[in-house]
Image: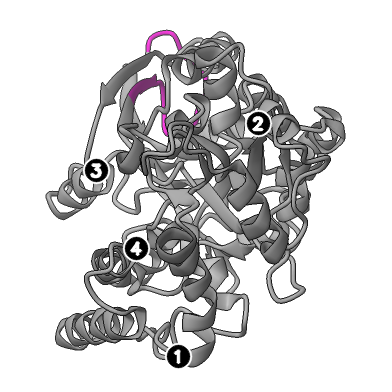
């Protein structure tokens, strides 16, 4: 998941004609691209791709501006005010609502056979389709895997990482350390992120579902609660798991890097961060342990989409086409923050053969896509508020999830 927490980039492009023809006497036109930036290195790689784009398109000038918070709020406000960018990033979980609202340009008429649309992972592409119309081209994806501190496992006499959730809980107990025996835990076995984008696959582990056929919340079922209860028990009963705030860290990745948690579920975006920020940390990754004898994880993807109100649609598509081409994708994918959405690029860069990245690649085949209809943004807020209260022991899980589902569905009903 983006890392599921964005900022925004606005790129102004000077384009020469709507037909994209070269004429040094023609007045250039301006289009914009908005997205987010996880770190400065990502921005540098994007700048390199843009410079290559400018070289191949000498009548295009690129200007980049970073906006640091509330990305979707900014995009929605601009769409309402008819001043939205021509092209912008869109996460899969936000896509259904924007597609239904009619603010996105269908891309089918722009896509030619040489673009090789079938090179994209179908699950990623389908996240931005409706009634056979393509509304976005996936630029990348991420999944979750189990990160583990190799030094901590070796010190505890653990030969290999857990392969099932039962093994994970037992391993976490061995890795939880109270050095002074004073009740203050120095190292927790497991790091936890309580938000719904990280917990949806737990709801589905025993047959639960996030929404019903009418897009109303449906996670408050015996099956859905069974998976979530595993998280609650590890946090409250076992006392072998911690949230980042419990150990004074700003993020799950930071808590792992600092050695405050010995294992954690995180996305591939954490790999460059950990290597750069904690160079002495010895860590490895493995696929998420099986739950109920089933493999599971989350899949997060982001696409480039076109504003239907754009007055420079030919130029906008030219940019999308370049950024999601094989060469454009390879240029930035080498950083490893996210994985390329084209199968050919993923194979060429050998992420599936890299031990630290291969668990994330494998997860794309069986993971749960972070998308569930138009109402998901409403459901997220209600779930997050109540689930964390259950983790903290403020209310039983069934009561918390019933309250969360009722609140979400009431808001969904009123919005229809």
Whichever of labels 1 and 4 marks the residue nearer the N terminus, that label is 4
Q: Residues within 10 Å of mark 1 (few under 14, many from 20)?
A: some
Q: Residues within 10 Å of mark 2 (few under 14, many from 20)?
A: many
Badge 4 crowding class, 10 Å Cα cut-off, few under 14, some 14 to 19, many 20 or more, is some
Q: Residue at x 67, y 63 (%)?
A: 165
Label 3, secondary structure: give it: loop
As measured in the structure, the alpha-carbon distance from the residue carrying label 1 to the one carrying label 4 is 29 Å
- Kind of element beneath mark 2: helix
Q: Along the line of sight, which residue is nearer the eye, 382 or 306?
A: 382
Q: Position of residue 245 (x, y in %)?
A: 30, 41
Categorize mark 3 by other alpha carbons within 10 Å: few (<14), some (14-19), many (20+). many
- Of mark 2 and mark 3, the one earlier in the sequence is 3
Nearer to us: label 3 or label 4: 4
Residues in magenta, as a range? 11-25
Q: Which residue is mark 1?
A: 221
- Spatial CA distance of label 3 from label 4 is 13 Å
Task: Identify the image quadrant of residue 17.
Answer: top left
Using the rendered view, name the quadrant where residue 296 is placed: bottom right
């Amino acid at each position: 998941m983006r890392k599921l927490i964005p900022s925004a980039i606005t790129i102004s492009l000077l384009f020469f004609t709507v037909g994209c023809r070269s004429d040094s006497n023609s007045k250039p036109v301006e289009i914009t691209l908005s997205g987010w930036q996880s770190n400065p290195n990502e921005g540098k790689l994007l700048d390199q791709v843009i410079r290559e784009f400018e070289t191949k398109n000498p009548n295009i000038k690129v200007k980049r501006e970073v906006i640091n918070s509330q990305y979707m709020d900014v995009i929605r406000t601009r769409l309402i005010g008819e001043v939205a960018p021509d092209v912008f990033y869109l996460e899969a979980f936000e896509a259904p609502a924007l597609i239904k609202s009619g603010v996105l340009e269908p891309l089918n008429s722009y896509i030619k056979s040489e673009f090789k649309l079938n090179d994209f992972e179908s699950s990623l592409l389908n996240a931005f389709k409706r009634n056979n119309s393509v509304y976005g081209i996936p630029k990348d994806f991420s999944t979750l895997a189990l990160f583990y501190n190799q030094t901590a496992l070796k010190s505890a006499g653990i030969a290999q990482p857990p392969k099932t959730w039962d093994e994970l809980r037992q391993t976490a107990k061995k890795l939880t350390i109270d050095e002074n025996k004073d009740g203050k835990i120095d190292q927790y076995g497991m790091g936890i992120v309580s938000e719904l984008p990280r917990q949806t696959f737990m709801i589905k582990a025993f047959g639960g579902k996030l929404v019903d056929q009418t897009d109303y919340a449906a996670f408050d079922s015996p099956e859905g609660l069974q998976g979530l209860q595993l998280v609650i028990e590890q946090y409250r009963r076992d006392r072998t798991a911690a949230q980042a705030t419990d150990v004074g860290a700003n993020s799950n990745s930071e808590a792992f890097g600092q050695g405050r948690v010995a294992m954690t579920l995180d996305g591939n975006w954490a790999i460059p961060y950990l290597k750069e920020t904690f160079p002495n940390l010895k860590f490895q990754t493995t696929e998420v342990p099986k739950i109920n004898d089933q493999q599971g994880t989350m899949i997060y993807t982001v696409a480039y989409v076109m504003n239907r109100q754009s007055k420079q649609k030919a130029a906008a598509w030219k940019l999308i086409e370049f950024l999601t081409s094989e060469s454009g994708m390879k240029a930035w994918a080498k950083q490893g923050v996210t994985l390329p959405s084209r199968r050919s690029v993923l194979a060429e860069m050998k992420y599936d053969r890299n031990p630290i990245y291969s668990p994330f690649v494998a997860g794309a085949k069986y993971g749960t896509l972070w998308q569930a209809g138009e109402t998901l943004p409403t459901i997220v807020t209600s779930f997050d508020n109540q689930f964390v209260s259950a983790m903290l022991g403020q209310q039983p899980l069934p009561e918390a999830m019933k309250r969360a589902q009722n609140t979400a569905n009431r808001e969904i009903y009123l919005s229809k």
